[in-house]
Image (cartoon, rainbow, N blue to C red):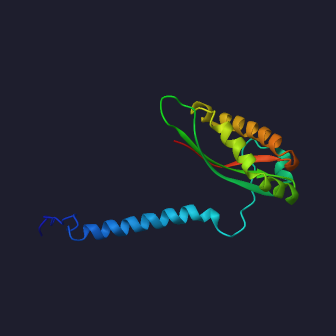
Amino acid sequence: MSDAVEDIPLTVPKSKTPLLLAVNSLLLAGLLVAFFLRGSGSHAPEPATPANGAAAESAVGSGPTVRLGDFTVRLRNPEADRYVRVAFELEVPSEKEKVELANRGPQTRDAVISYLSDRTVDDMRGGEALERIKKELLRRLNEVVPAARIRALYVTEFVVQ
């Protein structure tokens, strides 16, 4: 018996390389589209659960939530362009407040963007910082839309670049 192992080339012939690159790109694009469209379907969203540090009474009598959508905001940083991408859901006591909040979309988005654009990267680091941001945004949003009586603010997406 011979212990010699036959070398098998691990390269793809040049004629198949463009085809494999195209298939790989299509698969990657399909995965990205599926990932981003997953949350925007016509199905009802799952009820929001309280994040760590959320009030206990919010968990007991949780009401309907309103998704504020995605925010991409440039952070205050003189040395480099840094951005935060964040999405929120707001919990309100009833459908009436949900409608009121939906009617005041531009005001709520303005309050969030103006607050976040004054933050630095260091202001966004860690769980304690995120809790401070949530409390301040909750206070500001309740001032902007007092009829909505927002009970809780949940961060559903958070990325700093």
Total numbered labels: 0
Q: Name which quarter of the figure residue 160 lies in.
A: top right
The one of 154 and 10 positioned closer to us in this rendering: 154
Residue 158 rendering spot, x and y as whole percentages: 61, 46
Residue 56 rendering spot, x and y as whole percentages: 83, 45
Residue 30 rendering spot, x and y as whole percentages: 47, 67
Judge whether residue 63 can be spotted in this image: no
Q: Is residue 68 left or right of residue 97?
A: left
The one of 17 and 83 positioned closer to us in this rendering: 83
Q: Residue at x 26, y 67 (%)?
A: 17
Q: Residue at x 32, y 65 (%)?
A: 21
- Indicate whether 122 appears above or below 11: above
- Indicate whether 42 appears above or below 158: below
Q: Name which quarter of the figure residue 2 lies in.
A: bottom left
Residue 51 rendering spot, x and y as whole percentages: 72, 47
- Indicate whether 17 appears above or below 138: below
Furthest toward the top, the residue is 78
- Indicate whether 110 appears above or below 40: above
Q: Residue at x 41, y 68 (%)?
A: 26
Q: Is residue 115 left or right of residue 122?
A: right
Q: Quadrant of the N terminus?
A: bottom left
Judge whether residue 76 can be spotted in this image: yes
